[in-house]
Amino acid sequence: MRNQPKYHLWKNAGYAVEGFFEVFKHETSFKIEVYLSLAVWIGLLFVPMPLIAKAILGLSMLFVLIAELANSAIERTVDLVTKEQHTLAKHAKDAGATMVLFTVIFTAIVWIVTLYSVYFA
């Protein structure tokens, strides 16, 4: 049996919001990605294209934010475990960075394919 408190929706949602703002405050890359996503989401409101295309483009931006949050969790966990330079710590952090990179590449491909299908197909 796990030693954890009873589940409370609002309390757990509060932890999630707290985590978001902690990462936003301390991770420059996450802050840039949040601002870029907000700009894209606002811009999509004014672009003449089908709603489904806007949804695909807007939601694809969430993948980058999710990956950056996961990467931040990996980095913090590694830093908690060891402050020393260790090969496995580096590999864990590098894998997290690769996750973010692949997500950015995925999002770029989604944008290219979606915009091509809307405007050139």
Image (cartoon, rainbow, N blue to C red):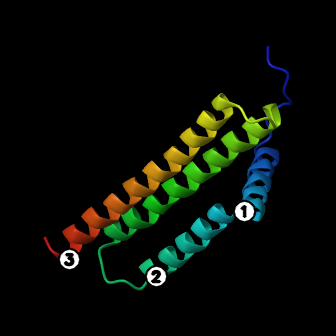
Residue where numbered disc 3 is placed: 119
Give the quarter of the figure containing the N terminus: top right
Label 1 crowd bin: few (<14), some (14–19), many (20+), radius 10 Å: some
Residue 17 is situated, as x and y percent measured from the top left of the image, at: 75, 56
Disc 2 marks which amino acid? Gly
Kind of residue at disc 3 = Tyr
Say whether marks 3 and 2 touch (CB < 8 Å): no
Left or right of 16? Residue 32 is: left
Q: Residue furthest top?
A: 1
Tag 1: residue type? Phe
**What is the distance, in whole Å, between disc 3 and disc 2 at their CAs?**
17 Å
Residue 7 drawn at (x, y percent): 79, 35
| Relative horizontal placement of residue 25, taking residue 73 as reference (left or right) | right
Crowd tier of the residue under label 2, counting other residues whose Cα lies within 10 Å: few below 14, some 14–19, many 20 or above: few
Q: Nearer the viewer, mark 3 or mark 1?
A: 1
Q: Earlier in the sequence, mark 3 or mark 1?
A: 1
Q: Which residue is denoted by mark 1 in the rendering? A: 24
Q: x, y percentage for residue 88?
A: 64, 29
